[in-house]
Image (cartoon, helix red, strand yellow):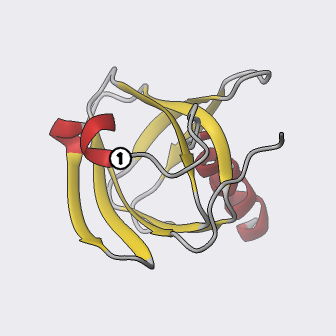
């Protein structure tokens, strides 16, 4: 059961990373009202992201990253060429993912959804081209 939950969460974060850029996005431009940058160094970027109910952010990509879910929530992740995936996430879930490609993330829940993401800049998304 834990393995399948982890795989689902990993897929959600992968889809969460849709972007037209090959590099990690500028969080302040992507979600200015729902972003708190905790650290931004040459090695990593640590951000608390909050997505309001009905809000969609992206497209974005991510380098390899760790995420920690701060609130319960329901997201729909839109990845080009795939059916949207709806995920129920629970407070306290940890997630690690290798670099992920372009996607948009929509909060389809009734409450704001928040998570901490730590992006590892030395392992960027490079695209498939």
* Residue 31 as seen in the image, left or right of residue 99: left
Residue 129 placement (x, y as % from top left): 83, 39
Residue toward you, 42 or 34: 42
Task: Residue at 83%, 43% (x, y): give it.
Answer: 128
Q: Nearer the viewer, residue 35 or 75?
A: 35
8 is higher (above) or lower (below) than 53: below
Which residue is disc 1 drawn over?
Answer: 26
Q: Is residue 126 left or right of residue 12?
A: right
Identify the image quadrant of the N terminus: bottom right
**Would you say residue 101 is visible in this rendering?**
yes
Identified at 20% across, 38% down, the residue is 32
Which quadrant would residue 38 be assigned to in this image?
Answer: bottom left
Furthest-left residue in this view: 33
Q: Is residue 113 visible?
A: no
Numbered disc 1: secondary structure: loop
Residue 7, image x, y percentages? 74, 58
Q: Is residue 1 left or right of residue 120?
A: right
Q: Residues within 10 Å of mark 1 (few under 14, many from 20)?
A: few
Residue drawn at x 33%, y 36% is: 30
Compared with residue 40, is residue 48 higher up or lower down, i.e. above or below? Answer: above
Residue 20 locus on image (x, y percent)? 58, 31
**Which of the 4 image quadrants contains residue 5?**
bottom right
Q: Position of residue 126 (x, y in %)?
A: 71, 53
């Amino acid at each position: 059961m834990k393995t399948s939950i982890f795989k689902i969460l990993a897929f959600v974060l992968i889809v969460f990373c849709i972007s037209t850029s090959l590099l990690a996005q500028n969080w302040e431009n992507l979600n200015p009202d729902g972003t708190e940058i905790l650290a931004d160094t040459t090695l990593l970027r640590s951000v608390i992201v909050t997505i309001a109910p009905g809000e969609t952010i992206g497209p974005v990509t991510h380098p390899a990253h760790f995420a920690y879910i701060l609130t319960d929530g329901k997201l729909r992740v839109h990845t080009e060429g795939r059916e949207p995936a709806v995920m129920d996430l629970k407070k306290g879930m940890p997630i690690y993912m290798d670099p992920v490609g372009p996607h948009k993330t929509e909060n389809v829940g009734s409450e704001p959804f928040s998570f901490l993401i730590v992006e590892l800049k030395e392992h960027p998304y490079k695209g498939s081209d």
